[in-house]
């Protein structure tokens, strides 16, 4: 893949995720200010999108974000889904207006399916079971409430467990009636959304061709992978000022410690250590080391093999 195509993919990803204004901003960390929390979440998604995946699976991408930032992130994911990507998201307690962003909903209770189908059929399904959505209530909060078990008191736990079990059995019976051997899933038609790259139709068309032909591309070789990963590792190091300062201090402290440890050591005598040679009674004898009288009797190293 050429550098021009790679740059095109990166630029398109920046536009899709709304990160154009933060393109030249350092990510930052605890000791250095950088991009915001929402931009950091979108950046983590962008690191995956540049590989042109057909399926994107996200586990609670809105955790730790405020309601407004979470909604913007869900809007971004909805936009990506309407451009041909499949996005699967696990989420807890989103805003009420985020309900319209989902195409399909899978509602689980302790690992068992309570509902799995189109979003537009979700509320009518529960209404048919006697659970109607009241006015001014978040639909997603309503779904979580009726599929959760209340453990505060034994009576509440028994009642909620019976309710959830009835919902699970109703959905299982519905699936059995529909047939277990389904080979196709009906996907709703998605309305086309305006693309950020509409003003650059030539680049957008080229990106679509690259996306279609990406499967036929060969993986980069060993030397190219090594060069790219080494360059990235060096950038991560020299852009992180606290890490560089820590490495410098580590080198200085180790140098001082080793220098103080081995400073002004006495010279080692060439004479043998007395207590290594003992007489017949076991007393140390100060004498020269024993050597063979005839050097020709020394065995070569191969003789000990």
Image: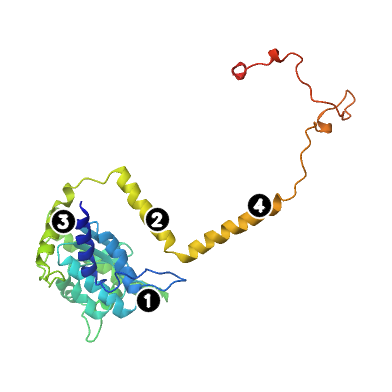
Which x, y percent locates residue 155? 39, 76
Between disc 2 and disc 3, whose residue precedes? Answer: 3
Q: Which residue is mark 3?
A: 211
Mark nearer the viewer, 2 or 4: 4
Judge left or right: residue 151 versus residue 114: right
- Say what secondary structure mark 3 lies in: helix
Q: Which residue is mark 1?
A: 156
Real-space CA distance between mark 2 and mark 4, rounded to the nearest whole angstrom: 29 Å
Badge 1 vs badge 2, beta-carbon distance below 8 Å: no
Residue closest to the eye, 35 or 287: 287
Which x, y percent locates residue 40? 34, 69
- Say what secondary structure mark 1 lies in: helix
Q: In terms of image quadrants, where is residue 57?
A: bottom left
Judge left or right: residue 151 versus residue 86: right
Mark nearer the viewer, 1 or 2: 2
Decide if residue 156 is in sight here. Answer: yes
Name the mark on residue 258. 4
Real-space CA distance between mark 4 and mark 1, rounded to the nearest whole angstrom: 68 Å
Q: Tell me the crowding category of disc 4: few under 14, some 14 to 19, or many 20 or more residues within 10 angstroms, Cα based.
A: few
Badge 4 vs badge 3, beta-carbon distance below 8 Å: no
Q: Which residue is mark 2?
A: 233
Which x, y percent locates residue 52? 21, 57
């Amino acid at each position: 893949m050429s550098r021009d195509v790679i740059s095109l993919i990166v630029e398109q990803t920046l536009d899709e995720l709304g990160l154009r204004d933060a393109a030249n901003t350092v990510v930052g960390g605890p000791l250095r200010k950088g991009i915001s929390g929402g931009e950091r979440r979108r950046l983590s998604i962008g690191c995956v999108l540049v590989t042109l995946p057909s399926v994107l699976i996200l586990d609670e991408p809105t955790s730790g974000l405020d309601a407004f930032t979470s909604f913007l992130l869900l809007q971004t994911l909805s936009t990506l889904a309407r451009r041909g990507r499949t996005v699967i998201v696990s989420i807890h307690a989103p805003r009420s207006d985020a309900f319209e962003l989902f195409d399909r909903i899978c509602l689980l209770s302790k690992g068992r399916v309570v509902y799995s189908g189109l979003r537009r059929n979700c509320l009518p399904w529960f209404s048919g079971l006697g659970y109607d959505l009241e006015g001014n209530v978040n639909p997603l909060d309503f779904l979580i409430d009726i599929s959760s078990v209340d453990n505060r008191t034994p009576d509440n736990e028994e009642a909620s467990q019976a309710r959830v079990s009835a919902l699970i059995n109703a959905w299982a019976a519905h699936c059995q009636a529909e047939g277990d051997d389904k080979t196709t899933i009906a996907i709703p038609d998605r309305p086309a959304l305006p693309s950020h790259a509409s003003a650059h139709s030539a680049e957008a068309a080229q990106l679509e061709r690259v996306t279609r032909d990406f499967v036929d591309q060969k993986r980069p070789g060993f030397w190219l992978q090594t060069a790219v990963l080494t360059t990235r590792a060096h950038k991560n190091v020299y852009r992180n000022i606290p890490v560089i300062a820590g490495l410098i201090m580590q080198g200085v402290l180790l140098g001082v410690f080793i220098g103080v440890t081995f400073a002004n050591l006495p010279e080692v005598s060439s004479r043998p250590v007395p207590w290594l040679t003992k007489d017949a009674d076991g007393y140390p004898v100060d004498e020269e080391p024993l050597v063979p009288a005839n050097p020709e009797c020394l065995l070569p190293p191969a003789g000990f093999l």
